[in-house]
């Protein structure tokens, strides 16, 4: 196992750079795997070729996806550059994992409705936001009350993928259910506060500036976990947001009940959101902003799902035959 101090230093440096907790955990796992692969030797004692050997091992022996290999490389680059202060030279001779060209899995509107109809309660509301607002799974789980404006019909996503903020729509069909849900959340958080809990974790800056905000309604999670936990450092009973696996399991179960043959996951709703907007004729730049893509080329992937590029190509079988003019 990697030496505890090494992992502590990695987490501290990652916190300074405001990496997401999931990214920090992933980087820590890769450092542990890297150290174990090299006989538990300290990374500072290893030559630069050790990184190449490890990454090639992942591709050859483990058969990992290209994105997984890239994540491992990013973790080791961060370790050497920011923790050990020994930046790695350019990696030469790495066997890259094969990156398959795949299209996103998209449901029809009818299939989306079938899956949502097979859900209920909070999970139905969360899945509806994934499809109706184009949210990613963790963006939905980590929504704060202050970032949902039911009057303006907007949702502000803070520090989404790539640490970018964006604004997306709140579907009108979800305004009343969301109002009722937020009222229930407020009542529950007041109940927890009355028992000495009701605290929530804050981002670094607000937490340092306004400790009273830990019980402020605006900072409460829109989808809080059903149980509290004890934060030993803060000496508080805090509420975390709902765990993503809760919704993942609910979506998978709903797809099975609905009899959908396709593989359906939480991200399928986001893919369907983008594709259905493009089908409706909305400008691709608008869809790009709603999704929070840095580059429009990422959004262009959904035009391939439509099988109609910029020219709107139609199959010749779907085109009417030419009208034959009478002779003479």
Image: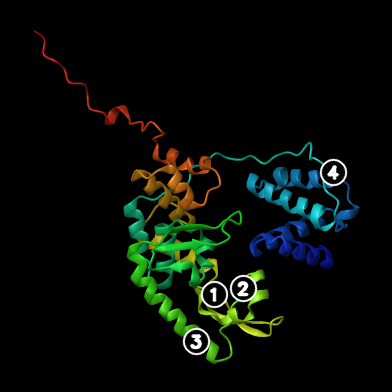
Q: Name the residue under label 2.
A: 202
Asked whether the residues under the numbered discs 4 and 2 touch, taking CB atoms below 8 Å apart as contact, a structural biologist would say no
Looking at the rendered structure, the secondary structure element under dot 3 is: helix
Q: Residue furthest top?
A: 328
Residue position marked by numbered label 3 in the rendering: 190
- Return the disc, 4 or 2, that comes first in the chain's sequence: 4
Separation (CA) of disc 4 from disc 2: 41 Å
Relative depth, front residue between 256 and 35:
35
Give me the disc on residue 219.
1
Residue 217, how many percent across, how many down?
51, 79
How far separated are the C-alphas under marks 4 and 3?
56 Å
C-beta proximity under 8 Å, tags 1 and 2: yes
Q: Is mark 4 on a helix, strand or loop?
A: helix
Front of the two marks 4 and 1? 1
Kindly identify the residue that appears in the image at 64 percent across and 44 percent down: 66
How far apart marks 4 and 1 lie (CA) works out to 47 Å
Q: Residues within 10 Å of mark 3 (few under 14, many from 20)?
A: some
- Mark 1 vs mark 2: which is more N-terminal? 2
């Amino acid at each position: 196992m990697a030496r505890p101090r090494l992992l502590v230093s990695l987490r501290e440096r990652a916190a300074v750079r405001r990496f997401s907790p999931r990214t920090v955990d992933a980087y820590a796992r890769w450092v542990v795997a890297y150290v174990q692969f090299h006989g538990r030797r300290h990374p500072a004692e290893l030559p630069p070729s050790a990184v190449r050997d490890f990454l090639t091992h992942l591709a050859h022996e483990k058969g990992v996806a290209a994105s997984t290999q890239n994540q491992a490389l990013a973790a080791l680059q961060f370790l050497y550059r920011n923790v050990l202060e020994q930046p790695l030279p350019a990696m030469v001779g790495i066997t890259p994992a094969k990156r398959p060209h795949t299209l996103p899995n998209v449901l029809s509107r009818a299939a989306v409705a079938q899956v949502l109809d097979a859900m209920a309660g909070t999970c139905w509301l969360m899945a509806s936001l994934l499809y109706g607002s184009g949210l990613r799974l963790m963006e939905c789980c980590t929504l704060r009350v202050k970032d949902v404006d039911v009057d303006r019909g907007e949702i502000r996503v803070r520090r989404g993928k790539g640490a970018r903020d964006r604004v997306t729509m709140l579907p009108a069909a979800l305004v009343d259910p969301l109002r009722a849900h937020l009222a229930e959340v407020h009542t529950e958080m007041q109940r927890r506060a009355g028992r000495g809990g009701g605290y929530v974790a804050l981002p670094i800056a607000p937490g340092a500036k306004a400790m009273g905000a830990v019980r402020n309604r605006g900072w409460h999670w829109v989808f809080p976990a059903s149980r509290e936990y004890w934060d030993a450092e803060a000496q508080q009973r805090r509420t975390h947001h709902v765990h993503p696996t809760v919704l993942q399991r609910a979506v998978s179960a709903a797809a099975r009940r609905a009899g959908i043959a396709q593989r359906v996951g939480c991200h399928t709703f986001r893919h369907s959101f983008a594709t259905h907007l493009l089908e409706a004729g909305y400008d691709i730049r608008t869809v790009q902003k709603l999704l929070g893509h840095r580059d429009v080329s990422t959004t262009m992937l959904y035009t391939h799902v439509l099988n109609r590029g910029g020219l709107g190509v139609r199959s010749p079988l779907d085109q009417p035959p030419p009208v034959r003019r009478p002779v003479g």
